Amino acid sequence: CGAKVDFVDIDPRTYNLCPKALAHKLEQAERSGELPKVVIPVHFAGQPCDMPAIHALSQRYGFKIIEDASHAIGASYTAAADTQGRQSEAATIKIGSCTHSDITVFSFHPVKIITTGEGGMALTNDSELADRIARLRSHGITRDPAQMTHQADGPWYYQQIELGFNYRMTDLQAALGTSQLQRLDQYITLRHALAERYDRLLADLPLRTPYRDPKQRSALHLYPVQLAAAGGHDRGSLFQALREGGIGVNVHYIPVHTQPYYQRLGFREGDFPQAEAYYRQAISLPLYPTMSEAQQDGVVSVLRGAFG
């Protein structure tokens, strides 16, 4: 869309966008006259970002917020809701309510918590944004008389008032997603039970298990662990041993600023040291709602064997 892209480093505890790093970058941007129009916090692995802090910065610096909640459907956090400039008592805020953002985006890719095969959803409390999103989804076409340039020729009439896209989800996909949505809370509860069991089973290994803020409820889309830096274990060798043992581990994710496209835009390794440090030690262990305790024990057994 022609935007100039920049990044913000992560909080080494949560792996999410660091509000302090964002505040520092915004101070620099204000001095240089390059404040952003939009900030896109990503709820990594299903753990909510510090949305009240990011929202407070948006009020000061005038940017819009789009939450990338691709990992975080079903997640929530506790915060004081701001009602017409007045702070109310703390409440549980669901990701997707857009309490502290302008738009929230969910993904329904096959590996996500619920799926429609592909596609996603954009949510907003802004009626004008909602209308435009719906219009752009369907070629820029409207049947709303208020948006047309002249009176309709008849009940069949529509107008294309801007150049849009063909981004409609099929009815079959929507039916699949709707049926899974009814089980979303059950899926999240099962993920939490498995993650808490992982925490106990891995407590004596040289690993850092995922941080979970007691004021938040993560969707736990992923269970990423960090190898202890002083443990002397090579991530590549450990990864290979786990794969050879039949464990479908992966690494989420390679820092995007190190990719060739962004390197050509001028980003360099070393620009965001916390994200890079996380990547060097990260491995995601299998986690899914139908995982049995026996399967989880198998993961832990192979992992212990890999550590020797």
Image (cartoon, rainbow, N blue to C red):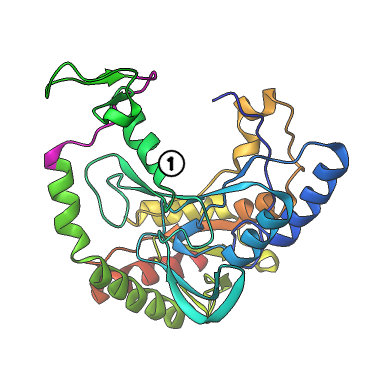
Q: Is residue 243 above or below residue 1?
A: below
- Residue 50 seen: no
Q: Residue at x 35, y 65 (%)?
A: 74
Q: Residue at x 75, y 41 (%)?
A: 35
Q: Is residue 237 above or below residue 301?
A: above
Left or right side of 282 for 19: right
Left or right side of 219 for 64: right
Can you say which quadrant of the picture contains the N terminus?
top right
Q: Nearer the viewer, residue 82 or 306?
A: 82
Q: Nearer the viewer, residue 88 or 44?
A: 88
- Residue 64 seen: yes
Q: Is residue 109 above or below residue 92?
A: above
Q: Position of residue 274 (x, y in %)?
A: 70, 55
**The magenta stretch spans residue 166:** yes
Q: Residue at x 65, y 65 (%)?
A: 53
Residue lying at the far right in this picture: please name it. 31
Q: Nearer the viewer, residue 2 or 245?
A: 2
Element type at mark 1:
helix
Q: Residues within 10 Å of mark 1 (few under 14, many from 20)?
A: some
How would you classify the magenta stretch by its main secondary structure?
A: loop
* Amino acid on which disc 1 is placed: Leu
In which quadrant of the rendered view does residue 33 lie? top right
What residue is disc 1 on? 129
Left or right side of 280 for 110: left
Disc count in the image?
1
**The magenta stretch spans residue 290:** no
Q: Position of residue 268 (x, y in %)?
A: 74, 34
Q: Nearer the viewer, residue 155 or 79?
A: 155
Magenta span of residues? 161-172
Q: Position of residue 207 (x, y in %)?
A: 56, 70
